[in-house]
Amino acid sequence: MSKKLLIYGLAFGSATAALSYIYMVAVASSPNGWQHLIAVLGEFLILPGTGIFLFLKSFKKQSPEQFMLGRAVFLGFFLSIIIGASVSLLYSYVSQFRPEIIAQLVDIKTNQFKTSKFFSTLSEKDVQLKYQEIKDNYTVRSQFIYQLFLGGSRGLFLSAIFAYFMKARMNRDY
């Protein structure tokens, strides 16, 4: 089972990382809101959710007697962590070898902050703190932590829903 978990994790992690790269290179600077919505939903929900669903379906087919809610939730959680780690590895690679892409993302967020209504109400010190906060959000460390927490929460949520609708057995011997 661990081999299948790794294969699904790397396959859907690679697809999610590819979508993340497309977002960083092409969509982030686009003013089209629909492109942003499709890219973000695809990266955060659709591709990982498809991976979790297909993995749980395969797990249920392979060993229906072991398809219990707790095990399904744990496996979906772990699969989503692998997917998140794959995206984090891509970000690390981009940060190392294409730092201009990360700088472009920071510039986009900084410009969005400058044009917000909130910007004019802040003092100069608060503005500088906010600029530093934006830069800190795009470090490899913060993206790694973000991807792991996102992956964990997404995996728990989606795998619990999928396992419930797939009629996973529940252990009632407590």
Image (cartoon, grey):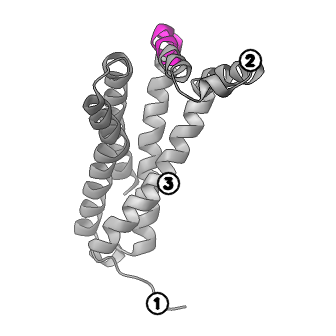
Q: Residue furthest left?
A: 61
Residue underneath mark 1: 172
- Neighbourhood count class around disc 2 (C-alpha, 10 Å): few under 14, some 14–19, many 20 upward: few
Q: Residue at x 73, y 24 (%)?
A: 126
Q: Which residue is mark 3?
A: 153
Going by the numbered disc 3, the residue's amino acid type is Ser
Which part of the image, by quadrant, shows the N terminus? bottom left
Q: Is residue 142 above or below residue 171?
A: above
Q: Which residues are magenta?
A: 95-106
Q: Bin the neighbour count of mark 3 within 10 Å (Cα to Cα): few under 14, some 14-19, many 20 and up.
A: some
Location of residue 63 (image quadrant): bottom left
Nearer the observer: mark 2 or 3; the answer is: 2
133 vs 9: above or below: above
At 43% from the left and 55% from the top, the residue drawn is 155
Residue at mark 2? 124
Q: What amino acid does circle 1 point to? A: Arg
- Image coordinates of residue 158 in percent, x first then y, are 38, 59
Q: Position of residue 149 (x, y in %)?
A: 55, 46
Amino acid tagged 2:
Glu
* Element marked by disc 2: helix
Question: Which SS type dominates the magenta stretch?
Answer: helix
